Amino acid sequence: MMQMAHPGLLWLFVLFVPLIAWYVWSWRRNEATMQLSTTQAFDALPTSWRVWAKHLLFALQLAALGCLIVILCRPQTHDSWATSDVEGTDIVVAMDVSTSMLAKDFRPNRLEAAKDVATRFVGGRDHDNIGLVLFAGESYTMVPMTMDNAMLVNAIHEVDTRLLEDGTAIGDGIATSINRIKDGKAVSKSIILLTDGSNNTGVVAPLTAAEIAQKYGIKIYTIGVGSNGSAPYPVAIDFAGNIQYQTLPVVIDEATLRKIAAATGGKYFRATSKSVLANIFKEIDSMEKTHLDVQRFSHTEDNYMPWALALLACVLLAVLMRYTVLRHVP
């Protein structure tokens, strides 16, 4: 499909009118004349081919001028618009950063495994508004709702258990996430909550926060992070600054996490390893597909070369005719 970058210059073709009028006037004015009583004897004579050649020469000159005008208009080629009809999604990733997330039943630990999986999840959501909320003994919005995936990924890499007071305030984490997402314009809103323990502090009760989310139409996908049985938990730091670990039973309040998910129309998952956690995020990704009205347009390129070649051909042919068949002999 062809378009013009400067279509207004097509008005230059109006110049053809005075040029053609001048040519007709000058042709008649320069014809030789002779007075005769009658021209009947010359009526059967054909028009000389040189006359048609001169008309062809003028036509070539007009064609060359026309090609030049089209080149000045910058003809361009491009593909048609491609529109995909999709619907936007708002997502908040609420991540537990309590000290227990340093447990080593995941490699290298629960927090690093969660960060790695969350990074890949965020990287695949090009058209979504995504926010990042951290919670431990308190909650904190690390990244408000944004479509800047690169900033989100960098922020996830900076997540650390030392950012917040220790504890597990699941209700506060949900409440902060709701405040981030509730005013979004997307039809679909969801919170992905990762935690490895039970609510033991905070101002808002987890089920109360779930009821608030349900009123705003926000789904909550809860993920219990931790292997079955027991795991090496951090219990102290020695004089050299090294974390000391002790094998303790894995205790996750799955009943509360299930109730939170059920109350909001979400789903509860249990991640017993990093690979299972990755599969959980893939399943959530398939359920929370992005839908937007996206228009894509192919690269536009100037396409003046055919017109330039036509211009060159007209000029060369006109010059050839001028100095051969239409050459004037002194």
Image (tube, rainbow, N blue to C red):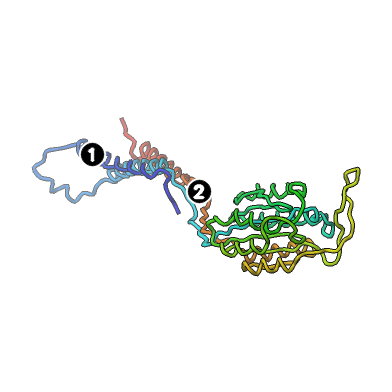
Front one among 84 and 276: 276
Residue at the spot of label 1: 27
Q: Quadrant of residue 225?
A: bottom right
For the residue carrying disc 1, how many other residues have a C-alpha within 10 Å: few (<14), some (14-19), or many (20+)? few
As drawn, 213 above or below 310: below
Q: The residue tagged with tag 2: helix, strand or loop?
A: loop
The residue lying at 64 percent from left, 50 percent from top is: 149
Task: Using residue 235 as the reference point, say whether residue 21 is left or right of it.
Answer: left
Residue at the extreme front of the image, as rendered: 203
As drawn, 3 above or below 228: above
Front one among 208 and 126: 208
Residue 36 in sight: yes
Residue at the spot of label 2: 300
Amino acid carrying label 2: it is Thr
The residue lying at 66 percent from left, 55 percent from top is: 122
Residue 313 in sight: no
- Tally of numbered tags: 2
The residue lying at 87 percent from left, 53 percent from top is: 235
Q: Say the numbered circle drawn on residue 126.
A: none
Q: Which numbered disc, 1 or 2, marks the residue closer to the eye?
A: 2
Front one among 202 and 234: 202
Q: Estimate the x, y position of residue 116 in percent, counting from the top left.
A: 74, 54
Q: Estimate the x, y position of residue 163 in percent, counting from the top left.
A: 74, 46
